[in-house]
Every structure is written in structure tokens, then in C-alpha cells.
């Protein structure tokens, strides 16, 4: 084929330049013709996915749903199949840090953030992650920049004990706070590394139908839509401005936080052996305890993930023994634990010290009891400490060590301290707490309520005495709380139920009447379902400012009317 006549007059150089341009143009056309793959993870609403599917040109975009219904390992399955994604849409409620989930009972699939992190850190899913240009996270707080953790004052105190000057300790504490902030935005940036555009919401995300409406408006205003280029699109952000949509880029190796990502990845990288992960943990525990403390959650999750077979491996046993022998790290760890701001943190560190081989089971129990002794001595027992004491001693393992606590009688008789001691197995303290349930002081009743969630009353005579005492309480918030506590016991004793039924006509407020109705409806109300009682309820019920309530539901049930759709 000869050169066309209209090109013969051009110089050789001009012909070459023109041919290069034509080849480049042809290559560009071919590149544009190649389809982009939109991967979708639909664990709740499909509204957002369907708008993208309907509005993007079919010849330019291909859609792949990664979720396989009924298969819990669907993400791993997609990774094994080598699915390659240019865009990723995740639709689901988000709990702020750990999981995308559905509010639909028929839909059991979820997406744990830990699974995304494991796949990203292990490089086990290059198809899904490596060529992403855009990620869309349709869930609340998916890109919230507020830190979820803080080193607080305990870090600063630890650094000063290590020899740092106060000014240096303050500066390093600020560095730790920034580095370990663990906001959801930072987490997503670490998972989706090198992705140019990650869209999400800093606060509440719109529900599926609303999001679909906004997306349709975006596609109406964008011609052509700039989807998949990796360039943040201000038109999309504008449509979702009222819903706090934001965009950020994934972490790169040049980012100051890249080193922190490499460290956190060592906890979940499947290419590392269990022994190698333990060696990394050992190195962390040799650092300033203020920083090691910030990895507490990850260390706990790591140990929980080891199988029994992995724990028996010689390399694992050797790595664990090396940690157990490190007395310097052990001393610093336990000293930091004793000075922790929150009792729950101190308890977790004591438990972890046992896992690390630094405390025997007996020493763990002694440390936990000592912690509660310190709290009682400082007058620092409140509802959360009572909840913690009962939870830690749910198997009564601390009962025998309670004798180590010898608070003065006046201190032990205070309701807060008595509740903690009752959680640790003291029968005398339990009697004091049960008495507090009928106290006129709401704070005392609350402490008893927390205790009884863990240690409910099982003796019928005790329940009768409590019911009688509650009936004599002055009508107040304390009486309502006491009745709510009794409702948790799902009473079946007719004498106790009748005692509360007699209280109904003289109840001082509609709140007290509602609380009585809750006790009855959660108990064996059929044992007192007599026409006379139904008449008393109907004639003596106080007017409800909110319309139909639990009292009306109880009356209907006592009359054996066909039950409407009710939710207690």
C-alpha cells in the first residue's frame, strides 16, 4: 500500500511525527474502550449499587458483586478467584470501627474491617486492592477523623517515670496521640493504600433510598460522569454536602504514618509465622510502656487468634518463653498497669500479663483483688467498677482472695463498696446491696441495679421482701429504677406479683405505673389475670402523655384480646 498523495508532500520528519500521533491516538481509543470493573460489597441496601449500574455506560463498566450469600468467606473467595477491581462500592451500616453490617434479619453477611486489614496487609488480594482508583464507603462515620483512642495522662506519667523531663514527656505524648489516634478515616487510609480517592462520611450517611436520589442527581449534573479516574469529583461532594461526604487518598510510602502501618500490619500479615509475630510483640514490650500500652487491643486480638496447634509449635514455645523471661519488661508493664487511669485497662493488662507468662493464675487473682482494694481505699467505686468486679468474678475465682481486702466497717457498709465486695463473693455485702435496692436515693438503687444484673435474686422470700420494700418507697425516680430492676427477674411468684398489683392504684405517677406494668408483663401475669384486677387497672391508670403505652398492652393481654403487633 503506497503513501496517500496528500502525505507525499510532507517531509520525512513530519510523516514520522504524524504516524506516531496516529498510533498514540489509536492506543488511547483502545485504552478508553477497555472496561473498568466496579466491585460491589452489598451487606445492606443495594440502592447505591443499582444507581451506579444503571447510570454508568454498560460498554465501559462491568459490575462484580463480591458477596456470596450464605458463604462466610466470600471475601477470601473473591481474592482466590483473582477478581480485579478498578472501583469498590461498600454499602452497609458501619459501627464506627470494626464492621459493616446489615439491619435486615434475612441478611446475615457482614464485612469485618479486620478482614479488609488482613487482606491488605498480607497482599493476599492484589486483584481487589492493587489497582483501585476509587473507593465508595456508604456507611455512617466511615471517614470520621475524630480519634477513637487517646494515651491520656497515664502515658505522660509513664514517660516521666522512664526519665523524660516533663516537657519532653508532654511532647512525646502528643506524638503518641497523633500516631495512635485510630480514627476510622485513618484506618481506611491504611487499608486502601495508594488509592487516589476514598469517599465516605464523617458523620451520618444517608439511608439507601436517599443516597440513590442524590447519586441520580449527581449523574444528571455530570456529563460525562468522572467515575473511575481517581480524581476527586467536587460535583459528587456537592450533592452529598449536607450528608458530610468527604474524600481522602490512601496512605503512600511517602506518608509520615507509613511506618506505623508497617507495624500494625505485622499483627495480621498472614505471611508471618506466629513466632515472628510474637517476636514483634516482644520488641514492642521493650519500648516505653506508654507506647506499648497503645497496642494493647492488637496484642489481645493476636493472642486470641492463635490456634492450639500454633501454640504447640516449638518456635512459638521458644518465642513465648523469651517474653516470659524478660523481667525488665515485666516490671515496667506491671508498674504501668498499676497506674492506669481506668480500672478496666488495669484489669486487661493484668490478664495479659498472665497470658505473657509474667503472672501465675494465683498472682493474677491477687493483683485483681489488690486493684479493687485500691479503688475502695480511694473511694473510686462507681457503677462501671461494680460492673467490672462482677464480670471478672463471674466464675467466682476471686472469692477465696477476697479475704485480702480488709476495709474498715464504715467503708465496707457504703453501698458502692458493698456492691464491689458482693461481686467478690461477700454474703454480708450482698445483704447490704439488696437493702439498697429499696433506698429512697436513686444513686444507691442504681448501684444495686448494676450488681443484680450479674447476680440476680433467686430466693422467693428475698423477692417478696424486696417487692414489699419497693411498695413502701416514695414515688420517685428511685422507685421506678427499683421496679425496672425487679422486671429483669421475670417474676413467677403470685404473692410478689399481687403485692405490686396492689401498688398500682396508689402509684404517684404514670412512670411508676408503667414500671409496675413492665414487671407484670415480663412476669407470669396470667396468674393474676382476674376481671377485678383488669377493672382496677382500667379505672386507676393515670393519663399517658404519649398515647398508648405498656399499660394498655398489659390490659389487652389480661383481657385476652387478640394481640396487636407490639414490641416491648
Image (tube, rainbow, N blue to C red):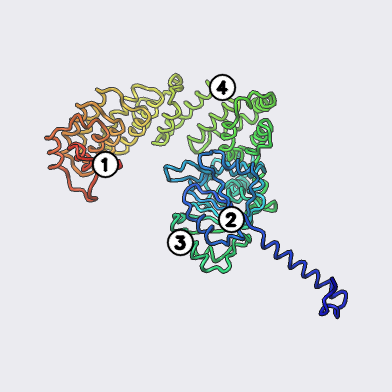
Could you say which disc has been placed on residue 198 in the image? Answer: 2
Q: Nearer the viewer, residue 283 or 381?
A: 283
Q: Position of residue 372 (x, y in %)?
A: 45, 29
Q: Horizontal placement of 504 versus 261: left or right?
A: left
- Mark earlier in primary sequence (1, 2): 2
* Residue at image coords 21%, 28%: 496
Q: Residues within 10 Å of mark 3 (few under 14, many from 20)?
A: some
Where residue 118 sits, quadrant-wise, is: top right
Of circles 2 and 4, the one toward us is: 2
Looking at the rendered image, the quarter that the N terminus falls into is bottom right
Q: Nearer the viewer, residue 464 or 195?
A: 195
Disc 4 from disc 3: Cα separation: 60 Å
Q: Residues within 10 Å of mark 1 (few under 14, many from 20)?
A: some
From this view, report whether residue 337 is shown above or below residue 186.
Answer: above
Disc 3 from disc 1: Cα separation: 46 Å
Could you say which disc has been placed on residue 477 in the image? Answer: 1
Callout 1: SS: helix
Q: Nearer the viewer, residue 330 or 406?
A: 330
Q: Position of residue 133 (x, y in %)?
A: 63, 56
Residue where numbered disc 3 is placed: 213
Residue where numbered disc 4 is placed: 360
Of circles 3 and 2, the one toward us is: 3
From this view, report whether residue 251 is shown above or below residue 372.
Answer: below
Where residue 79 sits, quadrant-wise, is: top right
- Mark earlier in primary sequence (3, 1): 3
Could you say which disc has been placed on residue 94 in the image? Answer: none
* Residue at image coords 33%, 36%: 446
Callout 2: SS: strand
Disc 1 from disc 4: Cα separation: 45 Å
Amino acid at each position: 500500500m503506497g503513501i496517500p498523495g496528500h502525505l507525499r508532500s510532507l517531509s520525512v520528519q513530519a510523516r514520522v511525527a504524524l504516524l506516531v500521533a496516529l498510533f498514540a491516538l489509536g492506543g488511547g481509543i483502545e485504552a478508553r474502550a477497555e472496561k473498568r470493573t466496579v466491585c460491589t460489597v452489598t451487606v445492606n441496601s443495594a440502592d447505591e449499587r443499582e444507581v451506579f449500574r444503571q447510570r454508568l455506560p454498560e460498554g465501559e463498566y462491568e459490575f462484580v458483586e463480591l458477596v456470596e450469600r450464605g458463604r462466610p468467606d466470600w471475601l477470601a473467595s473473591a481474592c482466590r478467584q483473582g477478581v480485579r477491581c478498578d472501583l469498590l462500592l461498600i454499602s452497609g451500616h458501619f459501627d464506627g470501627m470494626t464492621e459493616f453490617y446489615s439491619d435486615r434479619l434475612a441478611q446475615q453477611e457482614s464485612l469485618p474491617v479486620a478482614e479488609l486489614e488482613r487482606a491488605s496487609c498480607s497482599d493476599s488480594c492484589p486483584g481487589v486492592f492493587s489497582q483501585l482508583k476509587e473507593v465508595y464507603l456508604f456507611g455512617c462515620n466511615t471517614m470520621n477523623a475524630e480519634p477513637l483512642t487517646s494515651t491520656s495522662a497515664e502515658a505522660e506519667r509513664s514517660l516521666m517515670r522512664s526519665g523524660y523531663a516533663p516537657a519532653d514527656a508532654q511532647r512525646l505524648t502528643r506524638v503518641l496521640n497523633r500516631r495512635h489516634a485510630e480514627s476510622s478515616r485513618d484506618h481506611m487510609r491504611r487499608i486502601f493504600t495508594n488509592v487516589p480517592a476514598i469517599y465516605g462520611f464523617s458523620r451520618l450517611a444517608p439511608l439507601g433510598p436517599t443516597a440513590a436520589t442524590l447519586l441520580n442527581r449527581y449523574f444528571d449534573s455530570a456529563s460525562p460522569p468522572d467515575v473511575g479516574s481517581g480524581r476527586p469529583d467536587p460535583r459528587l461532594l456537592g450533592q452529598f454536602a449536607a450528608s458530610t461526604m468527604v474524600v481522602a487518598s490512601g496512605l503512600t510510602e511517602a506518608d509520615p504514618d507509613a511506618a506505623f502501618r508497617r507495624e500494625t500490619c505485622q499483627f495480621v500479615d498472614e505471611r508471618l509465622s506466629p513466632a515472628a509475630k510474637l517476636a514483634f510483640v516482644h520488641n514492642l514490650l521493650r519500648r516505653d510502656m506508654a507506647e506499648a500500652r497503645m497496642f494493647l487491643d492488637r496484642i489481645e486480638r493476636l493472642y486470641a487468634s492463635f490456634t492450639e496447634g500454633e501454640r504447640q509449635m516449638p518456635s512459638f514455645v521458644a518465642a513465648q518463653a523469651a517474653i516470659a523471661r524478660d523481667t525488665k519488661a515485666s516490671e515496667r508493664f506491671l508498674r504501668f498497669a498499676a497506674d492506669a487511669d481506668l480500672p478496666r485497662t488495669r484489669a486487661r493488662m493484668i490478664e495479659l500479663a498472665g497470658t505473657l507468662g509474667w503472672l501465675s493464675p494465683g498472682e493474677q487473682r491477687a493483683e485483681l483483688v489488690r486493684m479493687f482494694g485500691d479503688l475502695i481505699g480511694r473511694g473510686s467505686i462507681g457503677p462501671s467498677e461494680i460492673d467490672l468486679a462482677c464480670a471478672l468474678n463471674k466464675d467466682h475465682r476471686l472469692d477465696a482472695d477476697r479475704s485480702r481486702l480488709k476495709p474498715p466497717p464504715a467503708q465496707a457498709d457504703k453501698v458502692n463498696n458493698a456492691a464491689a465486695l458482693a461481686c467478690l463473693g461477700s454474703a454480708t455485702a450482698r445483704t447490704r446491696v439488696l437493702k439498697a435496692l429499696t433506698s429512697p436515693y436513686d444513686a444507691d438503687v442504681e448501684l444495686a441495679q448494676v450488681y443484680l444484673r450479674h447476680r440476680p435474686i433467686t430466693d422467693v422470700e428475698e423477692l417478696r421482701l424486696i417487692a414489699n420494700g419497693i411498695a413502701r418507697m416514695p414515688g420517685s425516680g428511685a422507685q421506678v429504677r427499683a421496679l425496672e430492676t425487679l422486671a429483669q427477674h421475670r417474676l413467677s411468684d403470685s404473692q410478689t406479683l399481687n403485692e405490686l398489683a396492689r401498688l398500682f392504684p396508689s402509684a404517684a405517677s404514670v412512670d411508676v405505673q408503667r414500671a409496675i406494668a413492665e414487671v407484670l408483663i415480663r412476669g407470669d401475669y396470667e396468674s393474676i389475670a382476674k376481671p377485678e384486677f383488669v377493672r382496677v387497672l382500667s379505672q386507676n391508670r393515670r393519663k399517658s402523655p404519649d398515647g398508648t403505652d405498656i399499660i394498655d398492652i398489659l390490659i389487652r393481654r389480661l383481657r385476652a384480646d387478640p394481640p396487636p403487633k407490639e414490641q416491648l
